[in-house]
């Protein structure tokens, strides 16, 4: 692992170039350009807010719309990483076949590019919360939230991009997986609603979904929500690390065959 990190550091200029390229390609030939990174989560917020109202997920809870906004912005970062990683390798055939470099740079650049977008969107989120009368006073909780989510996103990105090299149906599977994953993550409903449906003593199982703990951390940081009881956050962090280890193992064991498959 240390040797891999060092090899990535030696290729940091390539990594930076790929990150900048990913940011430029995202909005190439687009009239609104970067503003789509703000409009997309806004559209999701309005859509989910509308249907959450119909389904009465709000149930009179105060600050529900702010609660929803934080969840959507957090989720979009994860979803963008998962979708963009589909072509992290298959979209760089010439680079794979003609250049020697640590292949992990490809999914890593995808995650970092989406992190830049996420941080810019977070600045808008902060402005929105302040205008809404929500003053974040627990900013330090955003650091572990971002760290755990980056670990999760990199693990998933390596699994997805490696899988898409050998199984082109991966794109369709990811679409189904992301939809199912969204609904088991407390984005537009409170965590308590999910935990109530679990057997007594197994409430921690909700945190086997690492996005559950991540969303809770973000809401703690942005809105001052209380942390969930027990070791739930540790379970989510452990699950994220497990996915990173799995992604790294799969990616490293298959990368030597990328050029042949492509």
Image: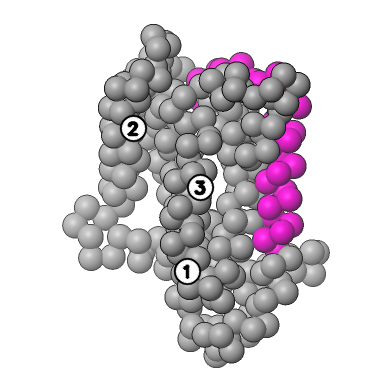
Q: Provide the residue designation for mark 3.
A: 78
Residue beneath disc 2: 48
Residue 76 percent across, percent down from the top left = 44, 44
**Segment colored magenta:** 222-248
| 225 versus 92 height, above or below | above
- Say which residue appears at 64% left-offset and 20% top-offset: 227
Distance of label 3 from label 1 (alpha carbons): 20 Å
Badge 3: few (under 14), some or many (20 or more) residues near its Cα, within 10 Å? many
Name which of mark 1 and mark 2 comes first in the sequence.
Answer: 2
Magenta stretch, overall SS: helix
Disc assigned to residue 169: 1
- Front-lying residue, 251 or 151: 251
The secondary structure type at the circle numbered 2 is helix
> In this view of the protein, can residue 77 be seen by the observer?
no
User: Which of disc 1 and disc 3 is earlier in sequence?
Assistant: 3
Occupied quadrant, residue 11: bottom right
Residue 69 placement (x, y as % from top left): 40, 29
């Amino acid at each position: 692992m240390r040797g891999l990190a060092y090899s990535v550091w030696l290729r940091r200029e390539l990594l930076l170039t790929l990150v900048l390229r990913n940011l430029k390609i995202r909005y190439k030939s687009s009239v609104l350009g970067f503003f789509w990174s703000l409009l997309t989560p806004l559209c999701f917020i309005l859509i989910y807010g509308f249907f959450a109202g119909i389904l009465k997920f709000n149930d009179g809870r105060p600050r529900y719309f702010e609660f929803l906004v934080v969840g959507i912005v957090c989720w979009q970062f994860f979803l963008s990483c998962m979708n963009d990683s589909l072509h992290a390798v298959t979209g760089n055939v010439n680079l794979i076949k003609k250049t020697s470099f640590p292949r992990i740079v490809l999914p890593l650049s995808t995650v970092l590019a989406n992190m830049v977008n996420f941080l810019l969107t977070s600045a808008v989120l902060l402005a929105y919360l302040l205008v809404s009368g929500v003053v974040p006073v627990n900013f330090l909780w955003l650091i572990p939230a971002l760290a755990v989510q980056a670990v999760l996103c990199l693990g998933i990105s390596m699994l997805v991009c490696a899988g898409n090299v050998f199984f082109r149906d991966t794109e369709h599977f990811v679409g189904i997986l992301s939809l199912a994953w969204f609904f088991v993550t407390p984005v537009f409903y409170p965590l308590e609603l999910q935990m109530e449906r679990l057997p007594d003593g197994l409430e921690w199982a909700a945190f086997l979904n690492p996005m559950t703990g991540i969303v809770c951390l973000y809401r703690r940081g942005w809105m001052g929500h209380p942390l969930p009881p027990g070791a739930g956050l540790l379970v989510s962090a452990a699950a994220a690390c497990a996915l990173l280890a799995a992604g790294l193992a799969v990616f490293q064991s298959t990368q030597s065959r990328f050029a042949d498959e492509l």
